Image (cartoon, grey):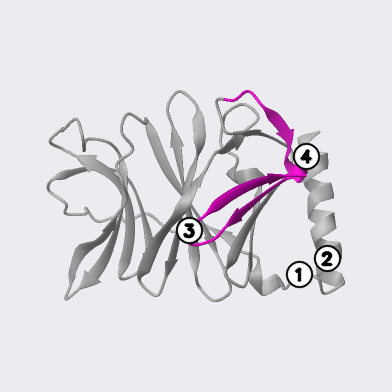
Amino acid sequence: MRKLLFIFFISLEQLAFSQGLIDTNDIAKRIYPPQVENKINLSSYDIFDNAQISKDELIIIAKPKEYKSDNGGLRMIYLVNDDDNFNIKFQSQNMGEAYVYEPYFFQFANNEILIFAEKGYEYTVGFDVFSLKEKSIKHLGFVGIAGSLRDSAVDQMRVLKEKNIYKLKFSGTIEVKPPSDRLVAGEKVEVIITENRVEIKEN
């Protein structure tokens, strides 16, 4: 059933493209940056994941080796190569007791990348959204959406941009604001993201 809904969802967007209602340049493409093979030298952090955005840019998921109750959780760190040394340029808030903080990447035609860092405990609770463009990164907000089994909703998601507004559209069944137990048909949900607000709209 989820597969049929996804095909229907894609067909509606293809119809919109043919009618000129959506500019395909404003639809983000899922990308899969490679991991860095060489050891990343951040002596004070344990590194759990990494992605090489460009030869001079890295995203890592890490947490401090020295535990502190107010700063011990996972976080996303953005590093930029300056004079042959990768230096921390941005660090997200720590995720506290979360077991998982996993980044997914979507890129627009203008090379802007949206990073969806999915947060999870025993189950997924949603994802932080970051915009990365021209070596500048911003946290746009948190989206409380998961898959129907409280798993990742990323594979059910389409990412669009209209001027300075980002929109997320979904297929299949999703859970809104887990752990709410409120399952909703994905095509009835749209997430609107601006620089200072996240809104989950249900039709």
Which residue is rendered at x = 49% and y = 64% of the image?
113
* Mark 4 and mark 2: Cα distance apart in space: 20 Å
Mark with earlier residue (1, 3): 1
Report if the CB atoms under discs 1 and 2 are less than 8 Å apart.
yes
* Residue receiving disc 1: 22
Quadrant assignment for the C terminus: top right
Report if the CB atoms under discs 4 and 3 are less than 8 Å apart.
no
Q: Is residue 21 above or below residue 130?
A: below
* Residue receiving disc 4: 3
Q: Secondary structure at mark 2?
A: helix
Report if the CB atoms under discs 2 and 3 are less than 8 Å apart.
no
Q: Nearer the viewer, mark 1 or mark 3?
A: 3
- Locate residue 26: give its quadrant: bottom right
Question: Residue 138, image x and y in percent?
Answer: 40, 62
Q: Is residue 183 left or right of residue 203?
A: left
Q: Inspect the image, locate mark 1, and give the three-letter code of the amino acid beneath it.
A: Ile
Specify start and end residues of the magenta stretch as a single range: 180-203
Report if the CB atoms under discs 4 and 2 are less than 8 Å apart.
no
- Locate residue 171: give its quadrant: top right
* Residue receiving disc 2: 16
